[in-house]
Amino acid sequence: MAAEQRQRKLRLFLLAAFACSLQAAGAAAASTATLSVRHKPSKPRHGNTRHGSHASSGVASCNLFQGSWVLDEAPPLYDTAGCPFVEAEFDCQKYGRPDKLYLKYRWRPASCELPRFNGQDLLSRWRGKKVLFVGDSISLNQWESLVCMLHAAAPASRTTYSRGTSVSSVTFQDYGLSVAYYRSTYLVDIVEESIGRVLKLDSISGDPWLGADILIFNTWHWWTHTGKDQPWDYVQDGAQVMKDIDRLTAFSKGMATWARWVDSNVDVSKTKVYFQGISPTHYNGADWGESSRSCAQQTQPIAGPAYPGGPLPAQGAVKSALGGMSKPVFLLDITLLSQLRRDAHPSAYSGGHPGNDCSHWCLAGLPDTWNQILYASLVA
């Protein structure tokens, strides 16, 4: 009897020990699981790689237009000395800019990394296609940037280059790719009539733009020109012809006309449409707390993710027009990231723009980032 009791106690002891071991193992497993959830993998080190990561970037769900500029010692994507398409107006190094720090900043979105720009990949994606920039000299700025980026990626590729008053193009012959620029400062029409040149807020002659696989539109800067700098004498809104009009109101009406034109004329199953956001100027240092300064002799961006001067009213007009469209348009919302780059203008170092140019952008430079985001929108 005593032996049976001892065996029963031994079995109970072993069962209890086994239960404890199971409990301990479960606790250890739970602890490991908790650690794996809480422990986030460290961000990959990119060293001198200027253009971030690919698969892990989370670009599809990331706001690419909120972030800040960070120093990066990697060289630009191209050297203007080796790009036959850059004009004197944007070639700051050739025309004497003494510093190069403005070339050493990389845009870092707040919640992801931009994909590295891969020119060979973009040339392959766009094989046999036609890409068309339509707009003013800011579109020209971005177009020249992109064709230099592609040329640097395939320097041995045969190209043909045509530069005209209205239409310019670079064809990458080995890829059957045409990247062109169509000058249209207002997008809406200016028509010569008996009373003079009339800006028609409700009329667009956009047939030459149809048939492109990628359309990238831009307008704004010329809407602010007055006096002898404006290329029209009257403005017409419907049946009303006026000597002048509030420029933001006119821009809003012009944008609404453009939006209707896209909705009525562009087949988005064949053509992807972009609108380049408002490119800012830096003539008034009060916008960033330096009342007596402009872009001249600026060598660094504005630090942080916010611009002291706030958003531009024209941004609202663009977003209102796009918000009322029935067809999809990708907004390259480059305003904030460009506002932070007071240092990236040609200022006095322009071969084709006398005086202090705080409107356009040096090449290489900021427009390369616009095109990097354009590329990210394709690979996301």
Image: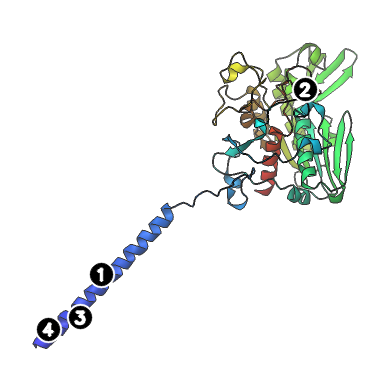
Check disc 4 and report the residue beneath it. Answer: 5
Check disc 2 and report the residue beneath it. Answer: 201
Cα gap from disc 3 to disc 1, whole angstroms: 14 Å
Label 4 packing within 10 angstroms: few (<14), some (14-19), many (20+): few
> Which residue does the image show at 67% across and 40% down from the upper left?
373
Give the colour scheme of this rendering. Answer: rainbow
Q: Disc 3 vs disc 1: Cβ atoms closer than 8 Å?
A: no
Rendering quarter of residue 304: top right
Which x, y percent locates residue 57? 59, 48
Label 2 packing within 10 angstroms: few (<14), some (14-19), many (20+): many
Label 2 is placed on what type of residue? Leu
Left or right of 263: which side holds 338?
left
Q: Please determine whether, in this image, residue 180 is positioned above or below residue 89.
A: below
Res 11 label: 3
Q: Nearer the viewer, residue 365 or 93?
A: 93
Cα gap from disc 2 to disc 1, whole angstroms: 82 Å
Res 20 label: 1
Label 4 is placed on what type of residue? Gln
Which x, y percent locates residue 174? 86, 50
Q: Earlier in the sequence, mark 2 or mark 3?
A: 3
> Which residue does the image show at 89% across and 36% down from the upper left?
162
Q: Earlier in the sequence, mark 1 or mark 4?
A: 4
